[in-house]
Image (cartoon, helix red, strand yellow):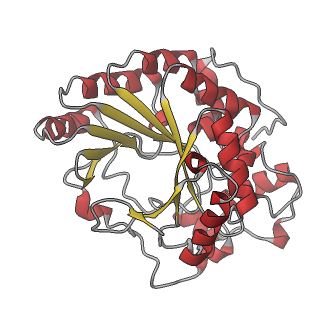
Amino acid sequence: MNKPETLIIQSDQPEKWQKILSDLITDPKDLLDYLQLDEAQRPASLMAQTQFPMKVPMPFAAKMRKADWGDPLLKQIWPATEEEIVDSRYVTDPLAEADSNPMSGLLHKYHGRVVLTAAPHCAVHCRYCFRRHFDYEENAPSRVLWQRCFDYIGADNSIEEVILSGGDPLALADKQIGWLLDELESIHHITTIRIHTRLPIVIPQRITNELIEILSLRKVKIVMVIHCNHAQELCSDSRHALNTLSSIGLILMNQSVVLKDVNDNADCLVELSRKLFSVSVLPYYLHLPDEVAGTAHFDVSRNRALNLIAQMQTRLPGYLVPKLVKEEPGQPSKTRIG
C-alpha cells in the first residue's frame, strides 16, 4: 500500500475519512517498513495476528516515532509474541458480557443504561481490547436488529441512557449515525446518548462538517467519551477535531487504560490530563486492564496504579485526576479502586 508521510485532510471532505478507513495498514511488515524497524528484532506473532489481525490507520501510524521499538503508540497495536503467553486468569470474556446480552446487539449490564454495539468494527485494533474475542458476527448491526433493540429500550422506562459502543460507532456513515440518533431520541424516556469512540484520535478526519451538523441537531444530551491513552496521540488534527466537537456543546470526557510500558508513569499521565483539558476534554476514568486472553503483558498492579493516582493528585487539580476503576463481572457498576 502507499505510505504517505503526512495526511492533511479537510473536514469538509467526508469521503476522505472513509478512504483512510478502507486503506488500513494490516501487514506488520508494511508498518515496520514505514517506521524503519527491523522485524528480526521483534517479530510479529502469527498466532496473535490470526486471532486478532493488526489494523492501523495511517494518521495514527504517522504519530509514531521512527526507528523506536519503545514507541508507546506502536506498543498498543503491535501483535507481539507475548500474546502467546497462556495464563488461566486471562479469558476470552473477562467481563462476562455474554450474561448481559439479552438480544443480539444490546448489552444491559447496569441499571438505567444499555449498550448498543452500533458498529461491528474499529478503525484500529488495540491489542489490550477487552472485546478482542467478542462475537461481532452474532451482534452485527442491521435495521431489523436495531428495531428489536429500540423495542426493548422503549419497553423499559428505567432506561434513560443509551451508550453507543462497538466496535466504534463513528465508523458508521453520517447518515446511519443520524438515523440511529433520531430513532433513539424518539423514545421518550431517553435523556442521554453516550458515544464511545477512538476515531477522533486515530482518524481525526472523521469529524466532518456533516457529522458536526448531525450531532448539533440533538434534543437529548450527547456525551462523547474519547479513548486516548497517551499525550503523543493528541496531534494537531486530533486537537482540532476535539475542539470542534466541544464548540457545539458536546460533553467530552476521556477514558484511558493504564498499560505497562505504555503510560504507567506519572509524568505521562499528568501530561495526558493537561493536554486533554487544553482541548476541553475532562479525564474521566483510568481503567486497570481487563484480564482478556492475550493481554497479560500489559498488566499493571493495583498498588502500582494507586501509586500513580497518588502522584497525580499532588500535581494536578482534582478535576484533572481520573477515577481509577476496574470492570468486574456481576457488579452493579464499575469498581472504584482506592
> Which residue is pictured at 14% across the width and 36% down the height?
151
**Can residue 22 be seen by looking at this rendering?**
no
Q: Quadrant of residue 298?
A: bottom right
| Residue found at the far left of this picture | 155
Direction from residue 113 to residue 324 in the image, left or right: right
Residue 39: image location, x then y, percent: 82, 66
> Which residue is pictured at 64% across the width and 19% down the height?
11
**Quadrant including the N terminus:** top right
Q: Note whether 107 is above or below 143 in the view shown.
A: below
Direction from residue 74 to residue 93 in the image, left or right: left
Direction from residue 89 to residue 143 in the image, left or right: left
Residue 246: image location, x then y, percent: 56, 26
Viewer-side residue, 144 vs 268: 268
Residue 218: image location, x then y, percent: 36, 19
> Which residue is pictured at 76% across the width and 70% down the height?
43
Q: Quadrant of residue 332?
A: bottom left
Viewer-side residue, 235 vs 122: 235
Q: Quadrant of residue 82?
A: bottom right
| Count of numbered badges drawn on the protein | 0
Viewer-side residue, 8 vs 81: 8
Q: Note whether 121 is above or below 304 in the view shown.
A: above
Residue 28: image location, x then y, percent: 72, 57
**Can residue 5 be seen by looking at this rendering?**
yes
